[in-house]
Amino acid sequence: MSIAEERPRVEAPAKKITAEEILAMTGGYSRLENAAGMGSLCVTALWLAARPPFSWFKDSLIEGSQMLRRCVLPLAVSISVFMIGFGFFVLGGITEVLGASDREGGAVIIGILRELAIWTTGMIFAGVAGSAIAADLGARKVRDELDALSVLGVDQVRTLVVPKVMACLLICPILGIFATFVSQVINFGLAPAEFGFSVGVLFASSTGSLTALDIYGALIRYVLIGLMVGVVSCYKGLTCKGGTEGVGRAVNETVVLTFFGVWMLDAFFNLAYLSLFPEAQVSFKG
């Protein structure tokens, strides 16, 4: 046996992967860049909106009216279907089985305010208004209109982003109130005949179970959802690349991110809300 054959083989040391390489392989840098960009855009838009001149007010009313027209019909249909299927038959059926059908109004109003109306409004608003904002700004981007505004010295954020974000902050709570109203109209129209109690009993159950904390919490959530949808859709529209295909990709990413954001915001808000205000635990009254 030769000396070379007797020499033990030395394994090469395993290559260590750095954090930078991991981020590069997983696309972490782009995700961090997007998160930082959205946060910066949110702060900048709110700061510009709070400082005079308030030239965004008229434009935000125009943007808001367009959002309202686009979202009202889909929201009315969606909340009606969910209300009849889940709120009326499921919650009403459960209270009837438990022998507490006179408390159906309290169960429905709490379910509507805390979950159903918020979730439905958030989904419709993100899918309709958010995608429209991303498509509008993305089309301006690929047509080089944004670059032309920069050359002319026009602030893109103050001119384009602030009116859209402020319109989202205004319209999302209005749509939430509308969804709650529609759901209650359906409940008051169907529940008394189905479960055999008067409208007065239903009204007493609804108002007795409702608290000011539920109303304030719902309004805060609508404002946060509107802010999130406005910022994400504006950022994706302003940063889209690749022509018309890039616009479509930006719209798709906007819908996915805002849908996920609505779910996460609702879950964490409920967790914080019920932890900070334990007196808001559900207590249906007849």
Image (tube, grey):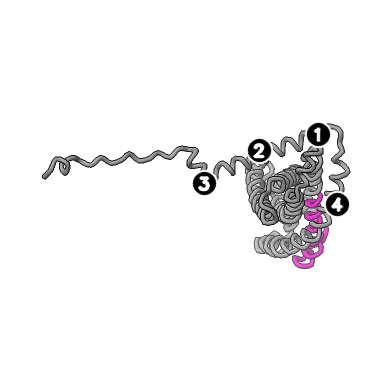
Q: Are marks 1 and 3 in contact (CB under 8 Å)?
A: no
Q: Distance from label 1 to label 4 (Cα)? A: 21 Å
For image coordinates 73% across by 50% down, the residue present is 142
Return the residue found at the far bottom: 194
Is the residue marked by circle 3 packed among few (<14), some (14-19), or many (20+) residues within 10 Å? few
The disc, 3 or 4, on the residue closer to the chain's N-terminal end is 3
Amino acid type for the residue under numbered disc 2: Leu
- Which quarter of the figure is the C terminus placed in? bottom right
Task: Tell me, for residue 65, which label it has, or none.
Answer: 4
Name the kind of residue labelled 3 in the image: Thr
**Residue 19: x and y, percent?**
48, 38
Q: Residues within 10 Å of mark 1 (few under 14, many from 20)?
A: few
The circle on residue 169 is none
| Residue where numbered disc 3 is placed | 26
Q: Which residue is mark 1?
A: 50
Whichever of callouts 1 and 3 sits on the residue coming sooner in the sequence is 3
Return the residue at label 2.
276
